Amino acid sequence: MPKNKLLLRLSANDLAELQSHLELIDLDLKQTLLEPDQIIDYVYFPETCTCSMVAQTATKAAIEVGMFGFDGMSNFVTRNGDRSYLRTTVMMPGQCWRIPAERFSEALGTLTSLNETVLRFKDAIAIQFAYTSFANGSFSIEERLARWLLMMHDRAGSDSLHIVHDTIAGMLSVRRSGVTNATHVLEGEGAIRATRGTIAIRDRQKLIAIAGESYGPAEHAYRMLLPVDE
């Protein structure tokens, strides 16, 4: 059985039909799955990896606008030949199911539970996009870093996040020195412990308190749209 929450929501018959087209693959750290304006060739359903969706232009620094792991999927292709308008990059390596975009778009038209689940996830990720934008514009670096670490922790399955400051700075579109200073603040509060290449979550509740209102609304919306007991 898959671990991906969206696949687990499918009816037994729909999952069996979809699985006949799914391939389990390994994804590497910083592997790029999609580039802006690229025709989508595969749809990805993470099992143990986590991916970031990044907006960028030719002249401006990139910034993360969304994140998904075993709770989600890579994109929202509905027709063969659809294009991506964000870069999708692997932030935590691991395993992932993939399906050719053509097969996926056909399945949307015939598998009722898949169509319903994808529509619900579209709403959930749109709300995540909105609150990421809100956080980027309205909260301090410390609050944004706490939120980002919580989101990674939600999808990691571990208290140890193998991530470097340069990567976080790129995702938050801030200077590396800003991430370093914010990390020291979170360490001083006892929320995390940072070592070379790793950030360990020591006290999740303290991290939630630091994140404040930047974390929580999008997660609540996901639970309402995709309840686990439905």
Image (cartoon, rainbow, N blue to C red):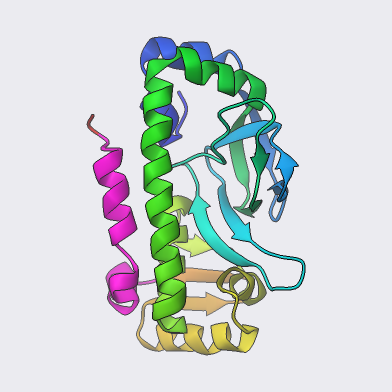
Specify whether 88 is left or right of 199.
right
Rendered position, 205 above or below 37: below
Toward the viewer: 56 or 198? 56
Q: State which region is magenta.
A: 202-228
Specify whether 127 is left or right of 19.
left
Picture mark count: 0
Q: Residue at x 23, y 29 (%)?
A: 230
Residue 149 lies in quadrant: bottom left
Q: Is residue 157 visible?
A: no
Locate residue 34, reporting x and y percent: 70, 45
Rendered position, 4 above or below 133: above
Viewport quadrant of the N terminus: top left
Residue 207 lies in quadrant: bottom left
Q: Main secondary structure of the magenta part?
A: helix
Q: Residue at x 39, y 79 (%)?
A: 138
Toward the viewer: 153 or 45? 45
Locate residue 152, reporting x and y percent: 47, 59
For residue 166: magenta?
no
Q: Residue at x 37, y 54 (%)?
A: 127
Rendered position, 66 above or below 122: below
